Amino acid sequence: MGGERRSGWRYVPLGEAGTWLSGGTPSTSNPAYWDGDIPWISGASLKSFRLTDSDRRVTQLGARSGSRLVDKGTTLFIVRGMSLKSEFRIGVAERQVAFGQDCKALIPADGIDPHFLAHAIQARTNEILAMVEDTSHGTGRLDTERLKALSIGVPSLEQQRRIVAAHAAFERRIAGLERVQEKLRVAARAVVDQALEVAKRVSLESWLDRIEAGRSPLAEDTPAGEGEWGVLKVSAVQAGWFAPLENKVVRNPNHIDPAYEVAAGDLLITRANTEELVGLACVVDVPTCRLMLSDKTLRIVPNTRVADPRFIALALSSPAVRRQVKVAATGTSASMKNISQRGIRSLQMPDVPMNEQRRVVSVVSAAREREAGLQRQIGKLCMIQRAVIEDLLSGGEMHRSAV
């Protein structure tokens, strides 16, 4: 919204765009203040544009005893917290809410639509993030006075509502695609669950040729580039998908051993991780560079006559097998658990014939491919949405074909 000023628009500093309010946190030691009916918005819970609920709620007494109540139509945004290091979170209350001291509230002045105000501020995200200062605790902080000096352009109320309507049209299209994605996930999960419900179980050992351990040579904590070798971080193995950029570059050629190279189609499992993440498994897609197996990951090599590696990965992610992994994992701290090769071999898997395994894998693969295509559509729509809204906020005209 910087640059040329538009005829018929008025330009006001944010300090004059509405009434500013600060929030607070009721005493957490007083149960009478918490678990009420009023959403309490904090830096952690302000994650959507339309604010309707929060993971924490306060009572009317709590809202009056250390917090602040605001009505529907109030703009709330983060002014302190780690999230400010990378993003500026802002939203509009869709009902009465309370909020914490890491947020500021802005009740729009007469003649300013609340959703337009939030969009106008959001459009200045890059400038706002440039204002973020580091605190002694390492978190980000926005100076309120600097923020109040930031100017926004305000057209007529009719134009404001056209801009809000354009944004809402994009949101509806994006939400529709996201609902289709969720239906695909649910349908694929149902196929997997049905296949895993068979009563008979066999040990993973009976499906395997071998398990191979990795190693962790001296490496630098930066990802390997083109033509370089890297060693996997444990975070490269996620539940059902592979993150190849989670690796450390190996510079010393004496530490590179092609025998440990990770290849497309490999089934990997984490040997050591937190209590919640140990034993995660995935099948490797095409790696982006040459990667070696680390000592915290294992390669499971199945007998492909009786087991499909992608089906094994699906089974290892199921709640029944995840519970077994937690029992088999050892370690005194929840922050670091280990599962042995013996523990992995003893995991009880659903005794599903090979033809059924392949059918399930085919259904899931098709669903994931379709979901990825929808995600690309969503990404394109989001880019167009940003461009159109920024143009409208700068006084441009909306083309009907855009939405």
Image (spheres, helix red, strand yellow):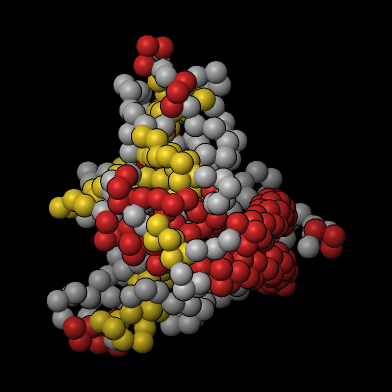
Residue drawn at x 33%, y 62% is 324
Q: In the rendered image, which quarter is residue 12 located in? A: bottom right
Quick check: can you spot residue 63?
Answer: yes
**Left or right relative to 115: residue 15:** left
Is residue 298 placed above or below 281 in the rendered structure? above
Q: Nearer the viewer, residue 340 or 222?
A: 340
Quick one: 357 or 130, which is closer to the camera?
A: 357
Which image quadrant is residue 110 in? bottom right
Name the spot of residue 233 as percent of width and height, x first: 38, 36
Image: 391 above or below 301: below
> How far from the left and from the top, in percent, is residue 282?
49, 48
Residue 118, image quadrant: bottom right
Q: Residue at x 48, y 82 (%)?
A: 95
For the C terminus, the quadrant is: bottom right
**Which percent across, then down, holds residue 173?**
71, 67
Q: Residue at x 46, y 69 (%)?
A: 200
